Image (spheres, coloured by chain):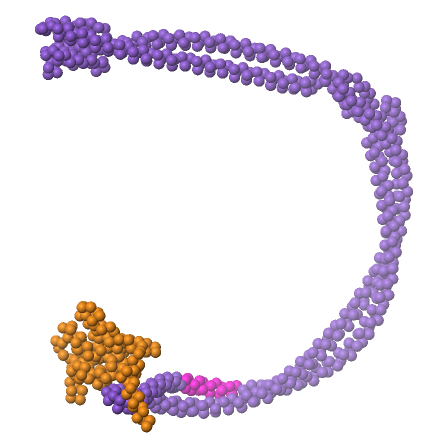
Chain colours: A orange, B purple
Amino acid sequence: MRKIHNITSQKKKMPETKRQFCSFQMAGHSFGVDILDVKEIIDEVVLTKIHHAPSEMLGFVNIRGHVHLVLDLRLLLNFETKSIDEASRVLLFHPNVGESFGVMVDQIGHMIEVEESLIEYRLSEENISGIARDFRKSELEKGVCKLKDKLLIILDASKFLNAVDLKR
Amino acid sequence: MKQTGIATKIILLSCGIALLLMVVGCILVAKYEMKLLNNITTVKIDEKEQYYLYRLYQEKNALSNHLTKQLDHLVSMMKSVDRVYAQTFEFQIQSLLMHPMVVAAEFCDNDGQSFLAAWKDKTVQVEKKFPKSLELFKSMVIKTHTGIPSIEKIRLYYSIEKLKQQLQEQKEQDMNEIHETRKNVHQQLNGLFLAQSIGSFLVVALLGIALVFSLRLLILNPIHHLMQIARQLKKLDLSVDINPSTASYELNSLTQALAQLLEGFRKIISDVKENAGMLSNSADTMTGIAEELTNHSEEAESKSNIVAEASVQISANIHTIADSVEQISDNMETVSSTSDYLFNNINSVANAIEELSSSLSHVGERAQNGTKIAEKAVHLAKKAGKTVNSLRFAADEIGGVSEFIQRIAHKTNILSLNATIEAASAGSAGRGFSVVASAIQEFAEQSSRAAKDITDRIASVQKGTYEIENVFKDVSTIIKEMNESSESISFAVIEQTKAVQEIASNALEADERARNINISIEDLTQTVNDAADNTAQVALGANDVSSRIQGVSESISFNRQISHQINETAIVLNHLSGNLKYMVDPFKVSHQSKSNNNNKE
């Protein structure tokens, strides 16, 4: 009885009130992506460089026989690039976000569960006027989540691949 | 000069002031007049000059008008004639030069070139042009344009120099007249000034003479009389007669007061003279009596002094005896106390030496023990060093293990994150699993923290073991040194013990002898004390006698001093009366008393 009651209450509240984010650190700032977009986190990375590719593309990585493209999120967010160290991790995304790719982050954080009311979304694209192309990098931002001691910037994983394309 | 001193001064001063004032007044008046005269003449000269300038201007205008008219007349005349010949021109130009003021004239044709010119150079010259030597720029010019075709212009030069000369002559004449009148006035003023100064001198002289006569009559005669009286008083002659018989009221009252003063003074002096004689006589007798008294008292004093000195000497002798006996007693006491002190010291030295000997033997035993203990300690320190070394190795191994644990914790963390992701993607079905995953993540973090903690601790342990090793090395070297020094100590102690035992036996003997000395000295002290008491009593008695005799002698000397003082006072009195008489004697009280005074003396 109790279990059933729990499940029903979760079903009611989950889509509306609670959301989960995978948080990580980049250059001293905290960012997050929707946990449903993330497929896996990888710690030991052997990169194969792609020549003639834009600098945002760090290279390919072989995960259990599958090849994935790895992007440098630092460059996408306009930070300076940094060499890979012990704390560096690769976030791999679901195929429904983009076809088999991941991003390199400085340090992985916790999985965070927050109430929907604590998230403030950005204004939709229509309101930003016609020069959206110049705001390519800011388009990666989806909104801001207010945590107890800091703000978590929420990124839209589905825009990452487009950001590289647009630059070309 | 002295008799007329005041008067002369007054007269000279007043006359001088009057003269000065008059002279100054004269000079001021003369100056003022001179200035006035000068002003008038300068005003006149200015007026004349202005008048001549005006005349010159008028004359100049009249001349130019006249010449212009003449030229106009000439032109009209030439116009009226139909034809004009060259001779006619010459005649005309010469006629123009007839005027005394005209210097030169020039006829010009249509082009402005002169074709006929005439000028005055002693006689009238006529040429076609002016020679270049002719200077016309000083003179005035009149130009006319004629309507006649052959003569376009006529220039007429004339000078006003002669006019100016005439006027200048007239002006100089006038000026001379003015200067002459001014000179005359000047001479008259000088005469006036001379007359004024002579008059003022005369007035001053008259004033001086009048002053001299009046002063002689009114003031100088009575003053002369007073001066004579004063001269007599200066010689201390009080027998002067004063009769106030002068004309002026002030001097009369002055002489009256002086007469009264003289009378009083005369009386006082005569009284003083009599009294001084009497005083002198009585002082003489008093002096004689006082001298006798002094002689008697001096004799008595000298006798009593001899007695007093003898008694003092006796008492002093007895005192010195008593003092010396007392000193002997004191000395004996100090000797006794020193011998006591000596005895005590020797006793304590003997005891101390005994104690020293026993403690030295103890030290020897201890030193030998120390050597053995040090050997043991060296052995133990070496063992401890080895143990510490093995401890260090163990710590290193633990460090490796903790690193391994940390790596496992990282892996677990990643695993838990992936599990969470999987659980989330499973949706509500994976809800339970997500709780488990988060718990695993927490464990992973805790184990990572613990591993880090262990690593830190191990590092500090390793540091500690290094330090301990170093310390043990130092300790073992120190123990070796200790061992060597304790061995040498034990040798030295054995030798010292022998020497101390010898000293102890000597000290005991000394103690015995000191006790004997002490006893005999105490006996001697007792007898000396008795002798001192007896002599002190004798000395007290002698002192008493001496002090009484001294009292008698002092009272006699006091008597002598008093009589001496009386004598001195009498002498002083005598002297004073003599002085008084001497001082009063010079005064002459009256004509008759002179002979009396001489008799008394």
Q: From the top left corner, tell me how far across and down residue A17 is, in percent.
A: 30, 82
Q: Is residue B265 left or right of residue B416?
A: right
Relative to B350, say whether B552 is above or below. above
Q: Is residue B401 left or right of residue B67?
A: right
Q: From the top left corner, tell me how far across and down residue B465 is, in percent.
A: 38, 86
Please identify the quadrant where the C terminus of chain A is shown: bottom left
Of residues B202 and A48, the one nearer the viewer is A48
Of residues A114 and B32, the one nearer the viewer is A114
Give the residue displayed 31% in from the left and 11% down from the top: B55
Which span of residues is magenta-colored?
A: B471-492
Number of numbered discs visible in the structure rendering: 0
Give the residue displayed 17% in from the left and 13% down from the top: B144
Of residues B327 and B393, the one nearer the viewer is B393
Relative to B582, say whether A11 is above or below. below
Of residues B327 and B387, the one nearer the viewer is B387
Residue B295 included in the magenta stretch of the image: no
Please identify the quadrant where the N terminus of chain A is shown: bottom left
Q: From the top left corner, tell me how far across and down residue B459 is, in percent.
A: 35, 84
Answer yes or no: is residue B426 visible. Answer: yes
Q: Quadrant of residue B501?
A: bottom right
Relative to B276, say whether A33 is above or below. below
Give the residue displayed 65% in from the left and 19% down from the top: B9
Relative to B394, say whether B152 is above or below. above
Q: Is residue A81 left or right of residue B21?
A: left
Residue B487 included in the magenta stretch of the image: yes
Q: Quadrant of residue B541?
A: bottom right
Q: From the top left corner, tell me how far across and down residue B287 is, in percent.
A: 88, 41
Q: Main secondary structure of the magenta part?
A: helix
Answer yes or no: is residue B407 visible. Answer: no
Q: Quadrant of residue B582?
A: top right
